[in-house]
Structures are given as structure tokens and as C-alpha cells.
């Protein structure tokens, strides 16, 4: 058995709806750590971006191993080839920009989670280790409307 304990809570403006991906938007986005973990933030502000790991605690849908992403025009893929929040272990991962840190609070760029989501961990994003220049779009590259679908994946608003 594996047991995770929350190290804090994520604060966002999203109550009944959240975007599919984190987007660079202004607003109140904070990681509020329990005070006993505040010391663990020492020197974190020297990084520009961080990984945020969290428990996806509000998804009520049953697990399906084959999913059809809403933006993919009916294409069905395995859950592990998707970014569906409905997973065997509902752990979410976002990369966000650090805006500032005050005491036990990390102010960030937009996060795609509901307000009050349990925070599991924070890790620094390091350019040479984490950016893979040969990364691709996997099965999305084979779709006829690839460029349009990539806008959905990135969470970029568009008119078509």
C-alpha cells in the first residue's frame, strides 16, 4: 500500500470548472504549504518554473483504459497515451512559473486545478534536464487537423 500525505493546498479561482491545461493567465494562483514545510522552500525562488504534483480529488467518473479526448474528434487512445484526469492513480502534474514566494506561500502562474486541491509535492524544473528538444506530439501528429488540435492541447483560446 502507498500512502501520500498532502503538504498543503492549491488555491485557484476555479470552483465548478477548470481548464484542461495550465495557461499563463493572471489571477490568484497559490500553493499554500503547511507551515511545517515552509523551510523546504529555501532557494526555490531561484528557479523560474516548478513542477506541481497534486491529488485529483474531485473527478467522479469511472476509470476507462481507453479514452476519447474531447478535443481529438473521436479518436480513442489508451489512458496512458492521454492527459485525462481519470487515471488509476489520480495524480496531476503541472509546470508553472513562480511569481514570488512569501513565507509558506508560492504564488504561481495559472494552474488547471480546482480551488482547494491537495498539494502533494513541488520540484524545480531545470532546463537541461526537463526540456527535451526531440519531444513530439505522438499520435496527435497523425491527425488530419493536427495544428488546430495542438491549440486545444496547449489550452490556447482560438476562434475555429
Image (cartoon, rainbow, N blue to C red):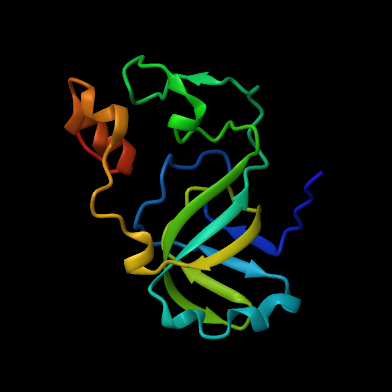
In this view, 136 is above or below 48: above
Report the residue at 44% width, 42% height from top: 19
Q: Which residue lies furthest to the top in this view?
A: 74
Q: Residue at x 53, y 59 (%)?
A: 52
User: Percent x, y for residue 108?
Assistant: 46, 67
Q: In this view, does 48 lie to the left or right of 102?
A: left
- Side of 125 relative to 43 (left or right): left
49 and 128: which is toward the camera: 128
The x and y percentages for residue 149 are 25, 30
- Quarter of the figure that contains the N terminus: top right
The residue shown at (72%, 71%) is: 34
Q: Quadrant of the C terminus?
A: top left
| 59 sits left or right of 83 in the view | right
Where is residue 150, by image quadrant? top left
**Hey, which quadrant is residue 76 in on the image?**
top left
Image coords of residue 156 (percent x, y): 27, 43
* Extreme residue toward the right, this view: 1
In this rendering, is residue 127 above or below 46? above
In this rendering, the answer to whether 150 lies above or below 76 is below
Residue 147 percent coordinates (x, y): 17, 33
Amino acid at each position: 500500500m502507498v500512502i501520500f500525505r498532502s503538504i498543503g493546498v492549491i488555491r485557484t479561482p476555479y470552483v465548478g470548472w477548470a481548464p484542461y491545461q495550465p495557461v499563463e493567465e493572471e489571477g490568484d494562483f497559490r500553493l499554500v504549504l503547511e507551515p511545517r514545510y515552509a523551510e523546504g522552500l529555501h532557494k526555490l525562488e531561484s528557479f523560474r518554473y516548478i513542477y506541481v504534483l497534486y491529488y485529483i480529488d474531485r473527478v467522479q467518473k469511472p476509470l476507462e483504459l481507453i479514452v476519447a479526448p474531447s478535443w481529438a474528434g473521436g479518436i480513442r487512445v489508451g489512458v496512458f497515451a492521454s492527459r485525462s484526469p481519470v487515471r488509476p492513480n489520480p495524480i496531476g502534474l503541472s509546470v508553472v512559473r513562480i511569481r514570488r514566494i512569501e513565507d509558506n506561500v508560492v504564488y504561481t502562474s495559472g494552474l488547471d486545478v480546482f480551488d482547494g486541491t491537495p498539494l502533494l509535492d513541488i520540484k524545480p524544473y531545470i532546463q537541461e534536464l526537463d526540456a527535451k528538444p526531440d519531444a513530439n506530439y505522438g499520435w496527435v501528429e497523425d491527425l488530419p487537423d493536427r495544428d488546430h488540435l495542438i491549440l486545444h492541447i496547449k489550452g490556447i483560446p482560438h476562434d475555429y
